[in-house]
Structure formats: structure tokens, C-alpha cells
Amino acid sequence: MNKLSTSTIAALEEMLQNAARPAPQDYLPIIFLGGAIPGQIIGYLNPDYAPYLQESLLQNPIPYVEIGHEHLTIRNASPINLSGSLAQMADRMHQGGFIFGWRHEDFAWIDQNGHEYFRLERSAFRTFGFRSTASHINGYTKAGSLWLGRRSETKATDPGRLDNLAAGGIGADETPWVNARRELWEEAGVPAQISNQIKPVGRIHMRRPIPDRGFHDEQLYIYDLELADSFIPTNHDGEVSGFIEISHSEAAARILADEFTSDAAFVTADFILRNTKTS
């Protein structure tokens, strides 16, 4: 049976309580004049990036986008027009060296009512601190072990770190459920007849500054999936270098030793706390 000390439980609980951290005070708020709450802050810009963008917009304005010394403002427009303007802004920031790892894949920004207001290259979301979404799947066995993937050393983000059985950013045309099942096949070789057994168990909101990259704001949709003791994950997309099967207590120790990606650490800690007894 998986058991943890009270001190380990307390450390995991404290970590989860601090999953959503505020943006640094010197970051420029990005204000959106549309959405469910017009005038709300929807992102943050690293102050080191602001002079470049200010000069670019002064020389060649972009529709619906304005920047001052205290904040960047995005005016309301139809989703297609707004997406076009923000794509121009992202392209300029990419040319200036402020967006890394261009993916040629769009994320959608969705307001509190579930409406999409714009789409943008996924790599730009961190640069502007826009809220994105991702799915994470805990793979576990009745025997009490967890399956974890190790990210490929060639990954642009968190190479070599431990991750959940499968996880991935949710594309603009995906739902969390669809994304989770796709990632399970691509990253861990879980066939449809098994992945359709995923169980939605919650959501974690994580926010943190990324040194020299921007601000990461993401809603993590969490699923649990029971795997047969005989099942062995197999990667199909080259993004995972291998898998390990470990106990809850070892997973907790590796979390506290900072071996995980930040988001996978939160998701795994949540699973452990829901399924582990204290000693």
C-alpha cells in the first residue's frame, strides 16, 4: 500500500496551493476590451520586450493593438480580424527574437463564458502571458504504481524531465477529451479501446514567470486512466525518451527533488494526495 509521511503530504499540499503565482510587478498588463469582462487583464508582457514592441508599433501600427508605458491594449474585433492582427504582432516578436520554438500550431483564447475570441501561434502564448489549456493523464495500475514518461532531450521545453503518462497543449480545434486521447496514443501508445476509459477528475490553474521567456498561464485538465499490470507504454511521436513505473512514494520524492516539469509535478502531486494514505 502506498503511504507517505505527514511532512511529505504537507510539502505536496503547499506546492499545489502555490500553483498559481502572480506575474512580477514590473510586467506590463495586457488589457482586452472584449470578452465576458471588457477591460480585464488577459496577459502580461516582460518589460524587457516592451521597448521593441513599442518601437515596432510606432513605426508600423497594427489594427486593434496599442501599447503605452503602463499596459498593452487589445481592442475588440471579430475573432478572425483580431486573430489576424495578433498574428502580425507575434510575427514581429518572433523576428525580434522574443518568441521561441515556433510550432505552426494555433491555440485559442477562450473567455469565462467559453467563447473563442482569437487564435494565435501556441509559442506566442507564453511571450504574452495568454491563458492556454492542456490535458494531463495519470496512468496508474491496481498494484499501486504510476507510469511516468521522460521527455525527449530534443524537446525545446523541459528536455529530459519527468512528465505524466501523456500530456499536451490543447489545439484550437480540440476539446480536452479529444486532446487527451490523441496524446495518449501519440506519446504512450494507448489504443482507443483503453483511452476511452479515461476519467475526468479535475482541473489545476498554474501561473508562473518563465525566465527570459515570458509568463506561463495554463488551465490543466486532469484525467486518470487505470492500466492493466501487463501494459507497457510505447512512444510514437519521438517526444518521450522512455517510461518508468514507480510507487507513489517514489514519485513524491522525485517531485520534491525537482525532477518533473512544473505542470506534471502539480498533476502528479494531486493524484498522490487523492490516492495515498499517511504513515
Image (cartoon, helix red, strand yellow):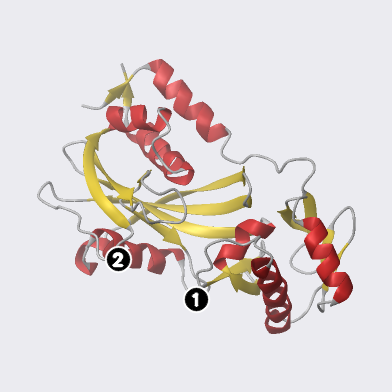
Q: Is residue 205 left or right of residue 167?
A: right
Q: Residues within 10 Å of mark 2 (few under 14, many from 20)?
A: few
Q: Is residue 63 left or right of residue 87?
A: right
Residue 173 shows which numbered tag?
1
Q: Name the residue: 30% across, 51% down.
A: 165
Q: Name the residue: 75% across, 56% down.
A: 49
Question: Which quadrant of the figure has residue 88?
Answer: bottom right
Tell me if residue 38 can be seen. Answer: no
Q: Name the residue: 74% across, 54% down.
A: 45
Calculate the distance from the C-alpha at mark 2 to the C-alpha at mark 1: 20 Å
Q: Name the residue: 42% across, 45% down.
A: 264
Write down the residue under mark 2.
237
Relative height, residue 167 to residue 243 (above, below) = below
Relative height, residue 170 to residue 62 (above, below) = above
Residue 209 versus residue 39: which sits nearer the camera? 209
- Under mark 2, the amino acid is Asp
- Under mark 1, the amino acid is Asp
The earlier-in-sequence mark between 2 and 1 is 1
Residue 65, image x, y percentages: 82, 71
Give the SS element for disc 1: loop
